[in-house]
Image (spheres, rainbow, N blue to C red):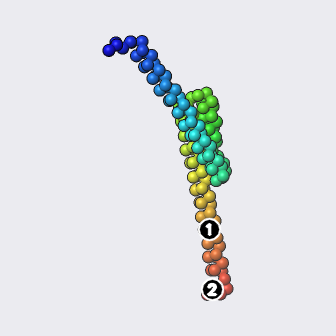
């Protein structure tokens, strides 16, 4: 049996490390891109729900984080891009929930006003003794 050449072992190890690093680098980009797309989708959904009116500060925060995540992604700072995208998505979801809550509260108040108006009309009607 031939002795193992140390140079061959070092080269094989180096190649393995390079392949591992390449695999990690290629998997980081799509994850960050997908997270950024999810953040944008949540942001768009929040906008459709009227969050700019009901939660403008949170929406601005989400928009800023999406922009910063895009910049980080372009600079190959994938961890930062993923972190910012996740925060932006959370902000957008909060803004949408706040908007829906505010709309529901307004609708409930409107129903209460309508009920009160009906009560007054019933109490003031001439057929009521």
Residue 79 higher or lower than 4, as above or below? below
Task: Give the residue furthest to the left.
Answer: 1
Q: Nearer the viewer, residue 88 or 6?
A: 6
Label 2: which secondary element:
loop
Residue 123 in sight: yes
Q: Could you tell me which residue is drawn at 66 percent across and 52 percent down? A: 48
In which quarter of the view is residue 77 placed?
A: top right
Residue 72 higher or lower than 15, as above or below? below
Residue 109 higher or lower than 128, as above or below? above
Q: Is residue 49 left or right of residue 79?
A: right
Residue 60 higher or lower than 12, as above or below? below
Q: CA distance from mark 2 to mark 1?
A: 23 Å
Image x and y of residue 101, in percent:
58, 56
Q: Could you tell me which residue is drawn at 45 percent across and 16 percent down? A: 11
Label 2: few (<14), some or many (≥20) within 10 Å?
few
Residue 80 in sight: no
Which dot, 2 or 1, sits closer to the camera?
1
Q: Nearer the viewer, residue 95 or 79?
A: 79
Q: Could you tell me which residue is drawn at 63 percent across and 50 percent down? A: 45
Image x and y of residue 79, in percent:
53, 32
The residue singled out by tag 2 in the image is 128
Q: Could you tell me which residue is drawn at 59 percent across and 60 percent down? A: 105
Image x and y of residue 49, in percent:
64, 53
Image x and y of residue 70, in percent:
63, 34
Res. 75 mark: none
The residue singled out by tag 1 in the image is 111
In which quarter of the view is residue 5 placed?
A: top left
Q: Is residue 82 left or right of residue 56?
A: left
């Amino acid at each position: 049996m031939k002795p193992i050449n140390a140079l061959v072992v070092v080269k094989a190890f180096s190649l393995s490390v390079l392949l591992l690093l390449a695999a990690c680098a290629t998997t980081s980009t799509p994850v960050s891109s997908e997270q950024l797309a999810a953040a944008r989708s949540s942001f768009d959904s929040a906008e459709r729900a009227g969050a700019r009116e009901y939660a403008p500060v949170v929406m601005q925060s989400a928009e800023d984080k999406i922009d910063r995540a895009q910049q980080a992604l372009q600079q190959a700072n994938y961890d930062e891009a993923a972190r910012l995208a996740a925060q932006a998505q959370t902000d957008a979801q909060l803004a949408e929930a706040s908007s829906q809550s505010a709309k529901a509260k307004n609708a409930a108040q409107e129903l209460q006003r309508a009920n009160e108006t009906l009560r007054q009309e019933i109490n003031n009607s001439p057929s009521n003794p």
